[in-house]
Image: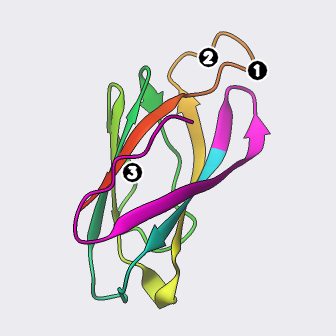
Amino acid sequence: VKPITPGPPLNCTSVTSMENTTYGAYSLIISIAGSFNQTNLMEVEMMFAGQTKMGPCSVGCLKEPLCDGATCLVVYTGQSGRRALTILNVKNVNPAAASDRPILFSITIN
C-alpha cells in the first residue's frame, strides 16, 4: 500500500487491512477519522496502479462503486456511525495470477 492523500473535511487515517484474499482480489477496509453521521456524504476516490474493478460495499454506500480505468469512486454515508468503509472484491480487471492484486496508490475523501 502506497501513501494516502486525505482530502477535506475528513481524513483517511489508514487502510486498516486488505483481507479475504481470493484469486487476484481482496476486501479493502478504510478507517475514516472525523465527526460524521449518516447524513454526511463522502466521495471516496481511490487511485490504483492499473485497471481495477470492485464489488459492493458491505454497508453504507449509496450505490455500487464506479471504476474507470485505474480510478474508482464510492459515495459513502457513514451509516450507523461506522468509521470504516469496507469494499468487497477489489480486483485487477485481468489478473495474471492469484497474487496479482491491485496496488492502491492514493485515497482522497471529500
Residue 90 vs 95, above or below: the answer is below
Q: Are marks 1 and 2 in contact (CB under 8 Å)?
A: yes
Q: Is disc 3 placed on a helix, strand or loop?
A: loop
Q: Measured from the top left, where is residue 74 in percent x and y? A: 35, 55
Q: Which residue is located at x 66 percent, y 19 percent?
A: 100
Residue 2 vs 20, above or below: the answer is above
Q: Measured from the top left, where is residue 61 in percent x and y? A: 41, 68
Point out the image quarter for the C terminus. bottom left
Q: Is disc 2 placed on a helix, strand or loop?
A: loop
**Residue 95: which numbered mark, if any?**
2
Q: Measured from the top left, where is residue 9 in percent x and y? A: 23, 71
Q: What residue is disc 3 on?
A: 65
Amino acid at circle 2: Pro
Disc 3 versus disc 2: distance between alpha carbons?
19 Å
Q: What residue is disc 1 on?
A: 98
Amino acid at circle 1: Ala
Amino acid at circle 3: Pro
In magenta, the rendered stretch is 1-26
Residue 58 vs 28, above or below: the answer is below
How many neighbours does mark 2 have within 10 angstroms: few (below 14), some (14-19), or many (20 or more)? some
Lower position in the chain sequence, tag 3 or tag 2: 3
